[in-house]
Amino acid sequence: MKKCYLFLIAQLFIVQCAFAQDTEIRKSAMDSTSSSNNPLDRQPSAYKLSELSRRIDLNFLFRSSAEFPSGSSNQAAVKMNESRIELKGDITPDLSFRVRYRLNRSYAPNSLDNAPGAVDHANVTYRFGNEKKWHLTAGKQAANVGSWEFDTNPTFEYQYSEYVGRQLNLFLLALELGYEVTENHSIQLQLHNTYNQDFNTSYNTAGYAKNGLRPSKTPFGIYVTWLGNMFDNKWQTFYSYNVSQFAKDKTDHAVSIGNKLVLDRFNAYLDLASTNLDVDYANIGSPAVNNYLAPLPAFVPTFLQDINYKTVVLRVDYEFIPKWFITAKGFYETASQRNNSEIGDDFREHYGYWAGLEYKPVANQDMRFFTYYYYNTSRYNNAVAEANADQKLHLFAVGVLYFVNVF
């Protein structure tokens, strides 16, 4: 039912703004027109529609493909990969908002933040201070992690590393304070919930024993982030450090370093990340260790403690002739438990890559037909390898994507 309401609202916006002439977002003061009972004022004027078009941005994000996998799954299907609707804009020159829904996700609220998983953004931003260099953003928002893979519009990111797809808490309730140091450099502090589900729900959902651990009284984290543009925006940096807590007296630390190269017809990013989790609530490495320990008489499954994750992600995009693009991406990830020599370093390795071709038929529209081949594998080392078989996936996909700026 909520989806129906959302679509109805979107249609109303589209109908009202069908004749707006200028779709560029500009900072604008609120209209000073007052409400009136005069029937002549009930229909929006061309001026009001034009002002709405300047101040409000309505986007629809879409990607769908026919996928032909083999390996762990061999059932072909036409998939709805991405379906999101976004509304954002300026209420005043100093106050803006952003709302984005994923139409193919659950609307059930999370146990800790009481927000549905379908909501990516539901926030407001206030700009203040000398020359409006400060800003404060409150509400559901993206984690301020230094990852260009995550920062890329999801319409165009066909497959994700486990760092983005499973390890990070991507969209969270948070309060962000930012400062524009110069025109090309800014810093942010983001106070956030460590995880959207509470401690007990996470353990109960996984079916794990708590082994004496207790929930943190303050399950918060802080991102410290630097965004930089250098060499006329050709080199862009996105670096972050995060400290957080999920369980009492268990502190997590993470560093993420994102670098991007932007040229006329060639783009590339390289992301590097290292995360130390005192409790593996991401549950990536824990299943393999639980499988290994399962034969022990007193064994009960639980989240692994003192685990380290490392990730390297590289993506390149090249327009080799007008409207035609080559795209390729690769990633390599490891999980280690260094305080246990039996399990040890790199007990789990995960890597994958894709290579594809895109065609953009309409120059001024972000619409593309695409095809790509994707390979993904997880393999296990040291003692853990005895109880865990390697996993492989081959996938061929062909489809269409469209980032629609409605107005």
Image (spheres, grey):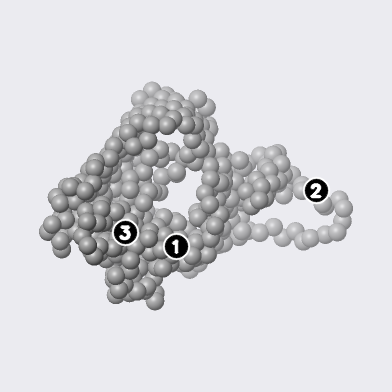
Amino acid type, residue under disc 3 in the picture? Ser
Q: Residues under labels 3 and 2: Cα distance?
A: 49 Å
| Residue positioned 24% across, 65% down in the render | 298
x and y, in percent, of residue 362 in the image: 52, 27
Circle 3 Cα neighbour tier, 10 Å, few/some/many (<14 / 14–19 / ≥20) = many
Where residue 309 sits, quadrant-wise, is bottom left
Kindly identify which numbered label has been placed on residue 196.
1
Please, what secondary structure does the residue beneath circle 2 have?
loop
Work out whether residue 101 or residue 104 is closer to the camera in this orientation and state it: 104
Amino acid type, residue under disc 1 in the picture? Asn
- In this picture, residue 5 sits left or right of residue 275: right
Residue 76 in the image: above or below residue 56: above
x and y, in percent, of residue 189 in the image: 38, 66
Residue 49 seen in render: yes
Amino acid type, residue under disc 2 in the picture? Gln
- Between disc 3 and disc 1, the foreground one is 1
Residue at the outermost bottom position: 217
Q: Which residue is mark 3?
A: 240
- Between disc 1 and disc 2, the foreground one is 1
Tell me if label 1 and label 2 are in contact, CB under 8 Å. no
| Residue positioned 33% across, 48% down in the render | 162
| Mark found first going from the N terminus, 3 or 2 | 2
| Residue positioned 32% across, 56% down in the render | 283
x and y, in percent, of residue 124 in the image: 54, 61
